């Protein structure tokens, strides 16, 4: 059995239950620790997935101060933590349409902006210039507080389940709904996230290998004499040179 270490970032608006989510899955309790989180705060657990053991740390990060640019908020620290994360839970409150809209619009764009190493005008919004090769990341969309809309309280739901599932399908992630009391469902969420993260890592490695191969070819080409560069850039020129050389040889033999 192989062991892997993975930090999971739980990203969502203030009040959607990020700390509660992390504590329930890690400690099987509500609010094992609590303080309104605007910076990474970690819980920890172990989980077996597909024959491998994963040591998981959870950083729950509030999207609200990032979005409203709260004075004194440590953007650089948060941006670095989020940008380096390979696994992200986008968490919203199913009784708050606003929390869903913000995490699927601003939150999703924020994640990709931090990873976009090729467009400084976008990454500049988050004061990040030095980007890693990491682009893709594992992700799940999770609607929290299902227990609040059960029975006679069904009218409190503001986010239809099929709406969230449609968005998740569109961007290529899985969607879940959870309550604060069912730990089994929370583990299903984490297993889906880990599998999606492993897929993202494989795709990143493949993409980075292609980039490295192209860079290597570019460097090798830069070392060639100028004539060889022209020939390698224009295959037709190479064929013409072969024909001319062959014709010249035949002409010399004829003499």
Image (cartoon, helix red, strand yellow):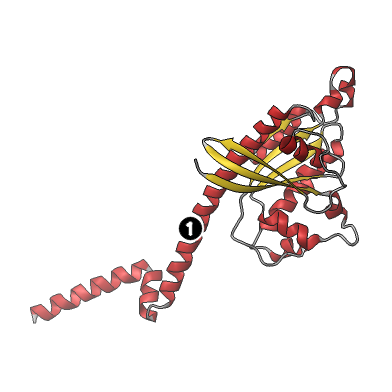
Q: Nearer the viewer, residue 1 or 145?
A: 1
Whether residue 113 can be seen here: no
**Which quadrant is the C terminus positioned in?**
bottom left
Residue 218 relative to residue 80: left or right: left
Residue at left 54%, top 45%? 3
Residue 206, placed above or below residue 1: below
Q: Residue furthest top?
A: 151
Q: Nearer the viewer, residue 38 or 51?
A: 51
Residue that badge 1 annotates: 209
Q: Residue 105, image x and y in percent?
A: 77, 45
Residue at left 69%, top 28%? 184
Q: Residue 249, image x and y in percent?
A: 16, 77
Residue 132, placed above or below residue 62: below
Residue 161, placed above or below residue 245: above
Q: Nearer the viewer, residue 35 or 161?
A: 35
Residue at left 22%, top 76%? 245
Q: Residue 1, image x and y in percent?
A: 49, 40
Q: Nearer the viewer, residue 227 or 104?
A: 104
Q: Quadrant of residue 169?
A: top right
Residue at left 82%, top 34%? 30
Residue 72, placed above or below residue 193: below
Q: Quadrant of residue 19?
A: top right
Whether residue 23 can be seen here: yes
């Amino acid at each position: 059995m192989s062991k892997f270490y993975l930090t999971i970032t739980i990203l969502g608006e203030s009040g959607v239950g990020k700390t509660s989510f992390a504590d329930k899955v890690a400690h099987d309790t509500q609010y094992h620790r609590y303080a309104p989180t605007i910076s990474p705060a970690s819980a920890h657990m172990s989980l077996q997935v597909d024959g491998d053991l994963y040591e998981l740390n959870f950083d729950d990060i509030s999207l609200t101060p990032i979005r409203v640019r709260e004075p004194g908020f440590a953007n650089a620290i948060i941006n670095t933590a989020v940008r380096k994360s390979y696994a992200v839970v986008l968490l919203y409150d199913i009784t708050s349409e606003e929390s869903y809209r913000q995490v699927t619009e601003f939150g999703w764009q924020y994640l990709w902006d931090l990873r976009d190493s090729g467009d400084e005008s976008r990454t500049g919004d988050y004061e990040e210039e030095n980007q890693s090769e990491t682009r893709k990341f594992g992700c799940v969309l999770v609607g929290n507080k299902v227990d609040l809309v059960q029975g006679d309280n069904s009218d409190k739901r503001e986010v239809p389940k099929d709406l969230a599932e449609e968005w998740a399908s569109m961007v290529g992630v899985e969607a879940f709904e959870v309550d604060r009391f069912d730990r089994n469902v929370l583990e299903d969420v984490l297993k889906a996230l880990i599998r999606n993260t492993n897929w993202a890592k494989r795709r990143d490695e493949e993409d980075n290998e292609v980039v490295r191969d192209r860079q290597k070819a570019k460097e090798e080409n830069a070392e060639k004499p100028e004539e060889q560069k022209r020939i390698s850039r224009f295959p037709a020129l190479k064929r013409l040179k072969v024909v001319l050389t062959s014709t010249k040889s035949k002409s010399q033999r004829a003499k």
